[in-house]
Image (cartoon, helix red, strand yellow):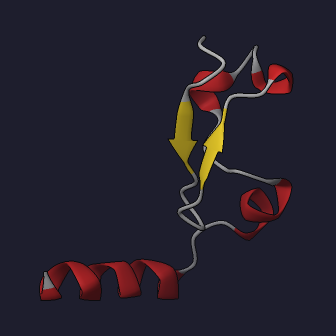
Amino acid sequence: MSARETKVCRVCGRRFAWRAQWARDWPAVRHCSRGCSRRGLRGVDQALEEAIETLI
C-alpha cells in the first residue's frame, strides 16, 4: 500500500493516513483510533446522518 493513502473514519468522519502498524490489515481498517473503534456508530448517529441526507 501507498504510505500516502488515506481513509475516512466511519465514526467521527476524520481522515487518517496509512500507518506501518496497519500494514497487514489496511483493507480492514475502518476507524481512526481505538476510541472510535470502541464507540462505534450509535442509533442517534445514524438518525442524524439520515436527517441530513433528506435535507440535501
**What residue lies at 64% left-to-right and 45% top-to-bottom?**
16
**What residue lies at 70% left-to-right and 51% top-to-bottom?**
32
Above or below, 10 against 3 in this view is below
Single out the residue that lies furthest toward the front.
4
Quarter of the N terminus within the rendering: top right
Image x and y of residue 31, in percent: 66, 50
Q: Quadrant of residue 5?
A: top right
Above or below, 12 against 25 in this view is below
**What residue lies at 13% left-to-right and 81% top-to-bottom?**
56
Q: Quadrant of residue 21?
A: top right
Left or right relative to 2: residue 44:
left
Left or right relative to 33: residue 31:
left
Image x and y of residue 26, in percent: 65, 24
Left or right relative to 50: residue 38:
right
Image x and y of residue 30, in percent: 60, 44
Marks counted in the figure total 0
Image x and y of residue 54, in percent: 14, 84
Above or below, 52 against 14 in this view is below
